[in-house]
Image (cartoon, rainbow, N blue to C red):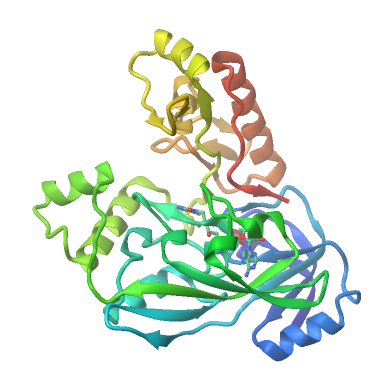
Amino acid sequence: MKINHNIQLKPFNTFGLDAQAACMIDIENWDDLQALADATNDFPKPYFCIGQGSNLLFSRDFEGTLIRMVNKGWEVIEEYQDYVLIRAGAGCDWDEFVEQTLGKGYFGLENLSFIPGTVGSSPVQNIGAYGVEASQFIERVHCFDWESGLFATIEKEYCEFGYRKSVFKQHPSWVVMWVEYALSKIPQTQTYYKALEDYLVKNELDSENPMIIRNAVVDIRNSKLPDHKKIGNAGSFFKNPVVDAGLFESIRARHPEMPFYMESETNFKIPAAWLIEQCGWKGFQLNGAGVHEKQPLILVNLGSATGKDVLELAGRIVESIKNDFGIELHPEVIVL
Ligand SMILES: Cc1cc2nc3c(=O)[nH]c(=O)nc-3n(C[C@H](O)[C@H](O)[C@H](O)COP(=O)(O)OP(=O)(O)OC[C@H]3O[C@@H](n4cnc5c(N)ncnc54)[C@H](O)[C@@H]3O)c2cc1C
């Protein structure tokens, strides 16, 4: 395993924030994991697993050890008439994995194209976009627990997948090593998500061709989201809040135009972006941090922000939405 001390984290987080980690360990294979298992007390604590840092906010220097899986590559481990079972290394770049599997004729992940990050974090976050979530295709996840020193395979029914959550989020000492994906050999596209459907209709595209869906998703994302290589960000900063019927009706009486999704008979999900825009935050800047001018759910580093600046901006937004709507926003981004 590769051990580095006093690492500058700017290249390791998509917010592009300056911070330092006391130690970072790159894990490439079984031997590295065994070595880590034998030496878990030798490195500064706490430990935290990191992928490409595309959902993280370093609010200050990290005093512990960052563990980074760098095992790349994937292979078909079982093949059936209609689908294949693929084992992918946690260190694979997510979008390269999506592009490569589609290129081989293994379908399903097309709607999840162009999401930054690694394969290893895909079950942790249960990444989702355009009406599809990674959990729909995950069969099992192979992990190592640095607290117990044990290796374990978690079958999908024990992964406790939900909206951007999983059992792995509750156990930060579990390092995901490999993820097994079941992908179809027969195209079965899912295009009911409105923005995607509208794009396909407008451009008269074949909605049954997964590669066309991938290209459409990439195009839509490019037109809506800031490129984190040019302007630092970590995607949606807040989760969309879910409110009960009483609060929902009282807000709707004041704002009949409010968009919403029904979660259940009594619970309603309200787009956090709409709430943030209503409170006048779109395009707002504070020190080097800002609210993206097109997509208010995304907080950006305009170049000189510190993690504290971003946190302060986020805190002000949370407070104003609480005051105006009685809704508490919670970050999707993990604050370290
Ligand atoms: C521009 C932009 C757009 C985005 N769009 C979307 C979107 O459409 N949908 C969506 O779901 N997300 C989106 N995101 C968020 C982000 O891409 C995902 O959360 C992604 O899965 C994070 O991957 P990462 O490898 O960078 O993980 P990190 O940000 O490094 O870590 C995220 C979490 O995963 C854990 N983790 C990472 N690797 C491992 C591992 N091997 N074992 C155990 N735990 C691990 C970390 O401990 C942490 O809890 C977007 C981000 C950006 C910057």
In the foreground, 217 or 88? 88
Question: 154 above or below 14?
Answer: below
Question: 144 above or below 158?
Answer: below
Residue at horizontal 24%, vertical 47%? 192
Question: 206 above or below 97?
Answer: above
Give the image location of residue 167, x and y in percent.
Answer: 64, 57
- On the rendering, which quadrant does ligand 1 occupy? bottom right
Tally the marks.
0
Quadrant containing the N terminus in the rendered view: bottom right
In the foreground, 19 or 50? 50
Answer yes or no: is residue 227 visible.
Answer: no
Residue closest to the far left: 204
Give the image location of residue 13, x and y in percent.
Answer: 61, 59
Residue closest to the far bottom: 31
Name which quarter of the figure residue 77 lies in.
Answer: bottom left
Residue at horizontal 46%, vertical 13%? 251
Question: 100 above or below 217?
Answer: below
Residue 74 lies left or right of residue 13; in this view the side is left
Give the image location of residue 71, x and y in percent.
Answer: 58, 82
Residue 256 lies left or right of residue 336; in this view the side is left
Residue at horizontal 49%, vertical 72%? 93
In the foreground, 320 or 197? 197
Residue 64 lies left or right of residue 185; in this view the side is right
Give the image location of residue 242, x and y in percent.
Answer: 52, 30
